[in-house]
Amino acid sequence: MELLSGADMIARFLQDEGIEYIYGYPGGSVLHIYDALFRQDKVKHILVRHEQAATHMADGYARATGKAGTVLVTSGPGATNTITGIATAFTDSIPMVVLCGQVPSTLIGEDAFQETDMMGVSRPVVKHNLTVRHPSEIPEILKKAYYLAQTGRPGPVVVDIPKDMTTPNERYEYVYPKKVKLRSYNPVVRGHSGQIKKAVDMLLAAKRPVLYAGGGVILGKASDKLVELAQLLGYPVTNTLMGLGGYPATDKQHLGMLGMHGSYEANMAMHHADLIVSIGARFDDRVTNAIDKFCPGARIVHIDIDPASISKTVEVDVPIVGPVDSVLKEMLALIKESKQDPDKNALASWWKNIDEWRACHGGRFVTTDEGIKPQQAVEALYKVTKGNAFVTSDVGQHQMFAAQYYKFDKPNRWINSGGLGTMGFGFPAAMGVKLNFPDDDVVCVTGEGSIQMNIQELSTCKQYDLPVKVLVLNNQSLGMVKQWQDMNYESRHAQSYMESLPDFTKLVEAYGHIGLTVEKLEDLEPTLEKAFAMKDKLVFINVMVDPHEHVYPMQIARGSMKDMWLSKTERT
Amino acid sequence: MRRIISVLLENEPGALSRVVGLFSQRNYNIETLTVAATEDSTLSRMTVTTTGSDKVIEQITKQLNKLIEVVKLVDLTEGTHIERELMLIKLKAAGSQRAEIKRTVDIYRGQIVDVTSSVYTIQLAGNSDKLDAFIQTIGTSCILEVVRSGVSGIARGEKVLSL
Ligand SMILES: Cc1ncc(C[n+]2csc(CCOP(=O)(O)OP(=O)(O)O)c2C)c(N)n1
Ligand SMILES: [Mg+2]
C-alpha cells in the first residue's frame, strides 16, 4: 500500500492515466501540486502566458487526437481566466479536464484572497464539475473527470481542489482506479435497431438524398464509415464547419461546407433534398437559417449520441440515438444484406441538378491585378502544404476562407472554434497540436484582430520551441464585423477598424521568432514556401489582403437554406 | 401545458443548483420545486412543476437527464397520478369572522393548527387548484400570510420511480 499526499496523488494519477503534457500557470492555491510535478519527470508542464491559452492548447490537442487535454490553474483569477476556453470546448463537445486550485476548505465562503466559486462560475459551461472534499478521494475524482470528459458526448470537466486537499504531510492510500462506475451516467453504446432499419429503408428509397455530416463524425471516429456509406450508395455529402475533414473534400461526392457561408451547391442540395441524413450534426442556426423554411420537402434522419440534440431545433422523422460509428456500421451491414440498390435514375438526375449548381457557382471569387485576395492566400497555403497540414483558425472572414478553400481530406486536421466562435483560439490551439505532432506542419490561419487576443503566447513558443506557422490574413479590420456593417448598416463601420496595428514583423522578432510580410501576389507562394521550409522556426507570415473582400455565399437572414448572397450584387 | 416532473438525483451538494441553473440557463419555467432526501439517504427526490409546449417539455426532460447527478426522472402528467401541495395560511379572525372562517376551513377539509384571539393559522393540503380556490373563497382582505410547499407528486397504481 502506497501513501501519498494529495498533491503527489495528482502527479501520480496523471502519470498513471498516461498524460504526457499538461498546460497551466501556477499560483498560491496550487503550489503543492506544482511542487509535486517538479519532483517527477513523466508529466511535462507547459507554462503558458495566460490561462485562456492553456485551455485552448489542451483543446487543440484534444481535437487533433480525440483524447482529453489537461489544464492546471490556480484559484480566483487563474480559474476565471479559463472560462472562455472551457466554454469553447463545451460548445464543440471537446474532452478536457481542468484542475483548478481553490482556497483551503476552511476559508471557502469567507471571500478569502483569490476565492471564486469556480463550481458556480463554470457550471453552465461544463459537462460536469467535481470538488474534492477529502484528499483520499482524489484518485477516484480524477478518474471520474477523465471518464466523463471522454465518453458519451464529450466535454470539459472542472475539478475544484481546495489547497488543504494537497497538503504535503498528510498522506493517504493511493490506488489508481482502473474503472469508475456512475449509476446516473450510462452513455448509449448502440442505436436502436428498429430505427436503424427504418433509416436504411428511407435511404434506399430516397430520390434526392443528402448526407449532412458534422463534428460528431470526427469526435466519434466514424470518418471511414461515412466514406464507405456515401460511396456504397453514391450519395452526396456535405460537412458542417465542425465536420470538415470527416469526408474527403477533394472527392467528387463532396459538396463542400453547408450553412451560412456554405457552398452554393451544398445549400441548394439541402433545400431541394427529399431525404437528409444528419450524422453527428446538430442543426445549428448557422446551418439551418430560418427553421420554418428549412428544407421543406425533406424527411430527416438524425443520428446523434446526445438525445437532447434530437428535435431540439428541427423536428426529425427518424431519430437514432447512438454513437455514429456503430450506427453507421449497422446501417452498412443492413444495406449490404438487403442487396438493394438506390434508384439509379433518380440519383443520376439528382447529380445532374447538383452538377449544374456546382457549375454555376462553384465558390468563385474575382481576382484583380492589384493586391492579394484572402482566398488566394488560403489556396497558396493549401498548395504549399500539399493539403496535409493541421490548420487551426480564429474567428472571422479568414476562418471562413480557410474552411472554404483549404480542402481537408482527413479528419482532425481542421481545428476551429465553430460553436462559440472564440477569437484568440487558433494560435494556442496550434501550439497544442504542434507539441504533440512535432513532425507535422501546423499552421494557424488568423486575422490581425484575432491573433492579438493571445499573441503573448509567442513567448511560450520560444520557451518550448514550438515552430508553428502563423498566417495572418491582414485586412486591417475586424473584417467579419465590417462585412455585416456593409450589408446591414449602410457601411457604418462602428469600431471595426484595427487602427494602430503593431509592426508584426518587429513584434515577432522581439519574441525571438521570424516575421515575414507579403504585399504582392507574386511573393505569396515563394514566401510561404520559404516559411514552411524553416521546419524548426516559428514563422509569422503577415499577408496584406484586400480589405474590401466579403465572404460569399452568405445566407440571407430569416430566409431558407437556398436564400443566399453570392456576391456583393447577386443573390439567389 | 402544465407538467409535473419527478426527479431522483444524487443527494450531493450542488446537485440542486445544477437543476435550477439548467432551468434559468435554458429559459424554462419553474412554477414550483420541492426537494428532500428519500428513504435511501444517497438519493433526493425532486418534484418540479413547469409549463411549456410539448417540444419544450421534451427538451426539459432530456436536458435534466443529461445532468450527471440525475439518476432517473418521470413526467408524472403522462399518466394518472396524485399531486399534493401543503399550505399554511394565517388569517385575521376576529368576532363574527371566526365562525365563518371555521366553516370554510371545514368545507375544504383544512385544519386550524394555531389560534390566538385575533388570528387563525390554517393547514390545508390538496392539489394546487384547491389551495387557489380556498384563497379565493377566503378573500385577500383577511389573509395575513401564505406559505405553500410547492407540489409533490407520485404516480397512481403499481408504477414507481426508484432505482
Ligand atoms: C472573443 C470574441 N470577441 C468578439 C467576437 C466577434 N467577432 C467575430 S469576427 C470578428 C472580427 C475578427 O477580426 P479578424 O480576426 O481580423 O478577422 P477577419 O474577419 O478580419 O478576417 C469579431 C470581432 C468574437 N467572435 N470573439
Ligand atoms: Mg481582420
Image (cartoon, coloured by chain):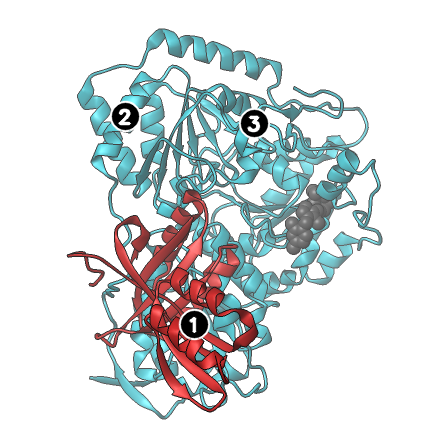
Left or right, A63 with reference to A468: left
| Total numbered circles | 3
> Considering only vertical position in the picture, is A335 above or below A311?
above
**Residue A17 in the image, given as x and y percentages of width and height:** 32, 66
Q: Residue at x 57, y 77 (%)?
A: A76
The shade of chain B is: red
Quadrant where the C terminus of chain A is found in the figure: top right
- Residue that label 2 marks: A200
Q: Secondary structure at mark 3?
A: loop
Q: Nearer the viewer, residue A167 or A506?
A: A167
Question: Residue extending furthest left?
Answer: B158
- Residue that label 1 marks: B148
Q: Nearer the viewer, residue A178 or A269?
A: A269
First in sequence: mark 3 or mark 2?
A: 2
For mark 1, does the 10 Å Cα neighbourhood hold few (<14), some (14 to 19), or many (20 or more) residues?
some
Task: Tell me, yes or no, whether dots 1 and 2 are on the same chain.
Answer: no
User: Do the residues under discs 3 and 1 have CB atoms within 8 angstroms?
Assistant: no
As drawn, the chain in cyan is A
